[in-house]
Amino acid sequence: MPMIKQLSKLLLISILLVTHSFVVSANNKPMISVFSINTPKLKLKYSEIMKNSVFHALIQRNFLTQDGNKIYHKYVYSFKRQAGKSKFHSIHEVVTNSLFKDKIDSELIVFLKLNLIEMNKNFLIVDMGAEVYNIAANNFLTSWSIPKKKIIFPTSCDKICKNLKMSSNIVLMSNQLGESLGNVLKLNFRENDNNKSFVKKYKFNISGLSTNEMLSFTDIIVNEFPGFVKLINKEHHGSQHKWIYFSNANNLKLKKWLNIALKQLDLEVGEKVDLNISNNFVVINKYPKTFSSGSKGNPKKFN
């Protein structure tokens, strides 16, 4: 009975960790999507325990995280299921899937790989590692692995005993993997070093600008902003404009450059337009030409 309680507690902690997949990154680090590669021989709960433990380790290092498996399942797997294809997937299949790349908000994706090598009924080896890709630039960045772990079960160890021993070892190993990945990514991400910056995905929402202002504004951010990669998914409804903008500029630099660009168009931020950048969302609203000031009232009585 104590073993069942311990296992339940372990799985509960794992579930609670995934609810904290979205956190605010105070240091403007890149958003990371964590994706566990599932195989037919691997129990799903072990993949989930590994993924959630890595989540926890990255969150503790102030990285913004996202569950890649949930997004893939929601937007891609439904089509695979309709086509009668396998629910399992390779890294290449995920990073090259245009629908998945369009729906995901992260700049980086960490693929977690877990392999359980069963030697006999009472002895197996756990092999765990990760590969990191820049999803926006579609290129491999780095890989990392930790030493293999040999797990020996006692002779009297039943199914519950083995599950508990496996789960606890996977938590310890994946915490170690997450800590190593966090340290590697921190070393490779320099906020003030453009050569080591990751491509970021910004969602623009602009309203109120005239056609000429929009044309001039688009020309500046595409042709003059350093670090521009691409601009996609343009939407236009009246004076409302939406698009996705890829750049290796961080939030602070982008906001500074947007202020300069808008001022160049005689659209002073705070006077004629409102500019807000939060994580990967950019909102620009032009104030109406005239505001109703209301009646003067009786300031002597109501002051």
Image (cartoon, rainbow, N blue to C red):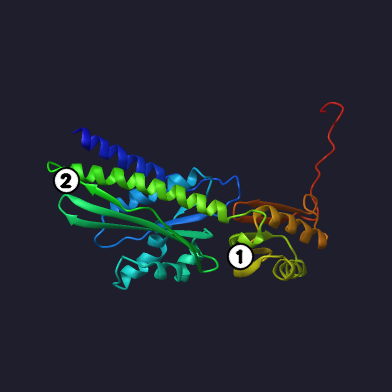
Q: Which amino acid does label 2 sit on?
A: Lys
Neighbor class of circle 2 (other Cα within 10 Å; few <14, some 14-19, many 20+) is: few
Count the marks: how many?
2
Image quadrant where one finds the C terminus = top right
Q: Where is residue 228 in the image (x, y as percent from the top left)?
A: 66, 67
Mark-to-mark CA distance, 2 and 1: 49 Å
Q: Where is residue 23 in the image (x, y as percent from the top left)?
A: 52, 45
Q: At x 51% / y 49%, what residue is drawn?
A: 183
Neighbor class of circle 1 (other Cα within 10 Å; few <14, some 14-19, many 20+) is: many
State the mark number for residue 302: none
Residues 5 and 159: in front is 159
Residue extending farthest top: 301
Q: Which amino acid does label 1 sit on?
A: Phe
Give SS at disc 1.
strand
Residue 243 visible somewhere in the drawing:
no
Residue 78 visible somewhere in the drawing:
yes
Q: At x 87% / y 27%, what residue is drawn?
A: 300
State the mark number for residue 159: 2
Q: What residue sits right under mark 1 in the picture?
A: 246
Q: Where is residue 137 in the image (x, y as percent from the top left)?
A: 55, 68
Q: Earlier in the sequence, mark 2 or mark 1?
A: 2
Horizontal placement of 280 versus 135: left or right?
right
